[in-house]
Amino acid sequence: MKITVLGAGTMGSGIAQLAAMNGHNVVAFDTSPDALQNGRVRIDDSLRRFAKAGKLSADDIENVTARLTLTDDLAKATCDASVVVESVIEKLDVKRAIFAEAVELAPVDCIFGSNTSQLSITAIGAGLGHANAPRLVGIHFFNPPVMMRLVELTRGYLTSEATLDHAREFAASLDREVVVLNKDVPGFITTRISGLVRMECLRILEEGVASAEDIDRACRLGLNYPMGPLELGDFNGLDTYLSAMDSLADSLGERFRPTPTLRNMVMAGLTGRKNGKGFYNYDEKGRRSSE
Ligand SMILES: NC(=O)c1ccc[n+]([C@@H]2O[C@H](COP(=O)([O-])OP(=O)(O)OC[C@H]3O[C@@H](n4cnc5c(N)ncnc54)[C@H](O)[C@@H]3O)[C@@H](O)[C@H]2O)c1
């Protein structure tokens, strides 16, 4: 299968890597030269870590790398695609616009997936036009896609059964487990649940009840979370976090509305691990540092 990934950021580069590691030919597209370059660096670093852990040989890495191209040429990226997975920024108009372009270039039998964390698949599908909206399905990966086993599949109002089947086969080809949402609801299953937990952590921090460190420690050691919600926010990007929460609040109610501190942090440029500061500080390699 040839897989196209639209957007080579945190998630897009990871999805591209996952698909290439599972034998697919992959082309990742991004409009930003920096994103393309950083995406390549992230993938190379991750492959090196797999090699260090004894999970990939030098030959494997060469083969994965040979199967994976990053480009700013949308026509090259989409021609011959079997699945086009969109993972651009979490903005409805940007997602609709990129799908409107891609549908003109991609083969008529390919399906389209959106990796949105919480936007309506039906609303995104409007970018494809009425005739092509049945070819779109929500294909929600988790960060980092090469490690996280779940893929959430969401039917839009017009998603066809054939598209859903194709998406299941695609997820199986990546060795992922799926859950299927029969209705298109904002936040799906996982973003709704994690959103509420996140909100309580933000409120506890805002009220000065405990430090970020202790809130995360409580969730890890007391609730058996692999990672605290605040450190996970840093890992995923606080800007992504903020817009997801705002959008959930708009559609599901004020219980999801982000706290002023989170909004201030993002406005001040503290977006988490990707730029070195969030709830915690990070060095240039993305490791936690004391300052
Ligand atoms: N970060 C996470 O943990 C996470 C998890 C699951 C899903 N998601 C979803 O994945 C999507 C991407 O999130 P991310 O964290 O990778 O964001 P990101 O900011 O790291 O990457 C987004 C990329 O989209 C690119 N882009 C913007 N406009 C574009 C366009 N018109 N054409 C092509 N590329 C374009 C940007 O240059 C950037 O590289 C979002 O919908 C987000 O909600 C994120």
Image (cartoon, grey):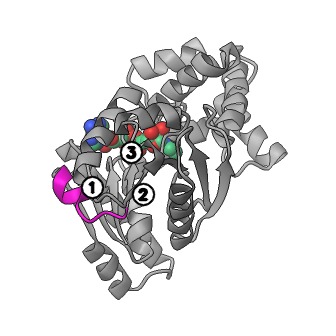
Cα gap from disc 1 to disc 3, whole angstroms = 12 Å
Cα gap from disc 3 to disc 2, whole angstroms = 27 Å
Q: Residue at x 54, y 31 (%)?
A: 279
Label 1 crowd bin: few (<14), some (14–19), many (20+), radius 10 Å: many
**Residue at mark 1: C-beta within 8 A of ligand 1:** no
Q: Which residue is mark 1?
A: 106
Q: Is residue 124 above or below residue 103?
A: above
Q: Which residue is mark 3?
A: 132
The residue lying toward the viewer, choosing from 207 and 55, is 55
Q: Residue at x 71, y 14 (%)?
A: 207
- Element carrying mark 1: loop
Name the spot of residue 150 as percent of width and height, x first: 62, 58
Determine the residue located farthest toward the front in the rendered image: 131
Sequence order check, earlier mark of 1 and 3: 1
Q: Which residues are magenta?
A: 74-82
Asked if the residue at tag 2 contacts the one at tag 1, i.e. Cβ–Cβ closer than 8 Å, the answer is no
Q: Is residue 28 above or below residue 172?
A: above
Image-quadrant location for residue 178: bottom right
**Residue at mark 2: C-beta within 8 A of ligand 1:** yes
Sequence order check, earlier mark of 1 and 2: 2
Q: Which residue is mark 2?
A: 14
Sequence order check, earlier mark of 3 and 2: 2
Ligand 1 quadrant assignment: top left
Image-quadrant location for residue 208: top right
